[in-house]
Image (cartoon, rainbow, N blue to C red):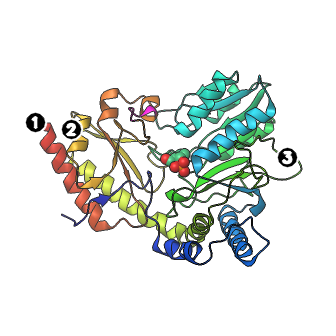
């Protein structure tokens, strides 16, 4: 048994890379100026650090730095994109989302509906994927915004966002994409992709918790957005509030590292993930893969087990850190709405596990997880 609980919950959050911690350190202890206080050297130093980070993040996305607005994470970026656009466009507009989105998209959408916005929640297929043709069919003359995530946080399925974005643009509709799980794991090229607004967050890519960004496409046609907060007018008036300079520096460093290692890292992580799935499917009968078999995040494995009680399963897995479909990713535990939307039965949803592998996962940990989970399932089935 390993000395520590084996961490396989990298979709919930990732360990901060030690190089990111080192990059942030001076911004707490020596370079602690406010980036808005540019009348003195401390402020200037902080403002320069923020702009360096903005450029590092933009480089990973092949975007223009000034189009990135710093936020506290992807939840805030999603809220700013969705509420911001709908409120700026005015009442009696139509918004399109889908059933497999994170609650940081679904909840703002439902709130807007209560306030009078017309809302369509599209279904997803058995892999949790959105069909571009369903988006095309749902667009109406008053549709203002479509929101579809890049990669699903539970089952890892990657959506055809380029195709969906093109459909939106042909019809004159803005396209928002929650890329919290994709940035730093998959190439996201905003010079190429027809995406108007993109949410990202540092803590899913080996950066610190509490910082993220919303990319807002620039150019001739300004995207209408109403800010969520009123205050000092920071971030081009879209996000008032003192910038968390150390976190932003860490976010920039995490993006710089991702750009360097992403390609090799995703191959290595995928090999480990395939080993985990191969090992589990060999050792355990009645185990099913949730999510798309190929078009999925390299580090994701989501599986359901026949004939096992979901709560007992989680209780029986104390030596590994994973998520379950019974008490999922939010602070308010509910059975996974994503698996439900994919048509997975309640019983299999409760008996599902999400493994999230990442930069620091080792082969030894995966070998341990295979035999540990296989033993636990065997024990539970014999109860
Ligand atoms: C797809 C997706 N969107 C949004 C979020 C929320 O991000 P944050 O924790 O930065 O607010 C998460 C995190 O679980 C996520 O996976």
- Residue 10 occupies which quadrant of the picture? bottom left
Residue at image coords 47%, 49%: 294
Disc 2/disc 1 C-alpha distance (Å): 10 Å
Disc 3/disc 2 C-alpha distance (Å): 53 Å
Q: Earlier in the sequence, mark 1 or mark 3?
A: 3
Q: Main secondary structure of the magenta part?
A: loop
The foreground one among 290 and 245 is: 245
Residue that numbered label 2 is attached to: 312
Looking at the rendered structure, the secondary structure element under dot 3 is loop
**In the image, which is nearer the foreground, mark 1 or mark 3?**
3
- Residue 345 seen from this side: yes
Q: Quadrant of the N terminus?
A: bottom left
State the image coordinates of residue 78 (x, y, percent, origin top left).
Answer: 63, 43
Numbered badge on residue 222: 3
Query: Ligand 1 near label 3 (Cβ, under 8 Å)?
Result: no
Q: Earlier in the sequence, mark 2 or mark 1?
A: 2
Residue that numbered label 1 is attached to: 383
Horizontal arrangement in the rendering, residue 307 relative to residue 199 (left or right):
left
Which region is colored magenta? 333-337
**In the image, which is nearer the foreground, mark 2 or mark 1?**
2
Dot 2, crowdedness within 10 Å: few (<14), some or many (≥20)? few
Q: Are marks 2 and 1 in contact (CB under 8 Å)?
A: yes
Q: Are marks 1 and 3 in contact (CB under 8 Å)?
A: no
Residue at image coords 42%, 29%: 340
Residue 290 in the magenta stretch? The answer is no
Residue at image coords 62%, 64%: 248
């Amino acid at each position: 048994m390993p000395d520590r609980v084996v961490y396989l919950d990298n979709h919930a959050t990732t360990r901060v890379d030690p190089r990111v911690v080192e990059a942030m350190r001076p911004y707490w202890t020596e370079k602690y100026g406010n980036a808005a206080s540019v009348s003195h050297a401390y402020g200037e130093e902080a403002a320069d650090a923020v702009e360096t980070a903005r450029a590092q993040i933009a480089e990973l996305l092949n975007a223009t730095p000034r189009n990135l607005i710093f936020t506290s994470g992807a939840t805030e970026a999603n809220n700013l994109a969705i509420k911001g656009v709908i409120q700026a466009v005015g009442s009696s507009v139509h918004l399109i989302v889908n059933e497999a989105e994170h609650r940081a998209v679904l909840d703002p959408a439902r709130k807007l509906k209560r306030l009078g916005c017309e809302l369509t929640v599209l279904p997803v297929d058995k892999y949790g994927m959105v069909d571009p043709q369903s988006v095309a069919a749902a667009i109406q003359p008053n549709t203002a915004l479509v929101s579809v995530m890049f990669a699903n946080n539970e089952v890892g399925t990657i959506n055809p966002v380029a195709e969906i974005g093109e459909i939106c643009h042909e019809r004159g509709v803005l396209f928002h994409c929650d890329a919290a799980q994709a940035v730093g794991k998959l190439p996201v090229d905003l010079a190429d992709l027809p995406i108007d607004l993109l949410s990202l967050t540092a803590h899913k890519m080996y950066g610190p918790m509490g910082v993220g960004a919303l990319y807002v496409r620039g150019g001739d046609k300004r995207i209408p957005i109403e800010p969520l907060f009123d205050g000092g007018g920071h971030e081009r008036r879209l996000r008032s509030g003192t910038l968390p300079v150390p976190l932003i520096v860490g976010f920039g460093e995490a993006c710089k590292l991702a750009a360097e290692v992403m390609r090799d890292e995703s191959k290595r992580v995928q090999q480990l993930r395939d080993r985990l799935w191969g090992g589990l499917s060999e050792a355990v009968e009645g185990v099913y893969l949730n999510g798309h078999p190929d078009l999925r995040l390299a580090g994701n494995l989501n599986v359901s087990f026949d004939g096992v009680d979901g709560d007992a399963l989680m209780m029986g897995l104390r030596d590994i850190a994973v998520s379950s479909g019974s008490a999922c990713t939010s602070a308010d535990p509910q059975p996974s709405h994503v698996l439900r939307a994919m048509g997975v039965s309640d019983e299999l949803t409760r008996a599902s596990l999400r493994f999230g592998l990442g930069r620091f996962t080792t082969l030894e940990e995966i070998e341990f997880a295979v035999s540990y989970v296989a033993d636990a399932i065997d024990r539970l089935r014999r109860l």
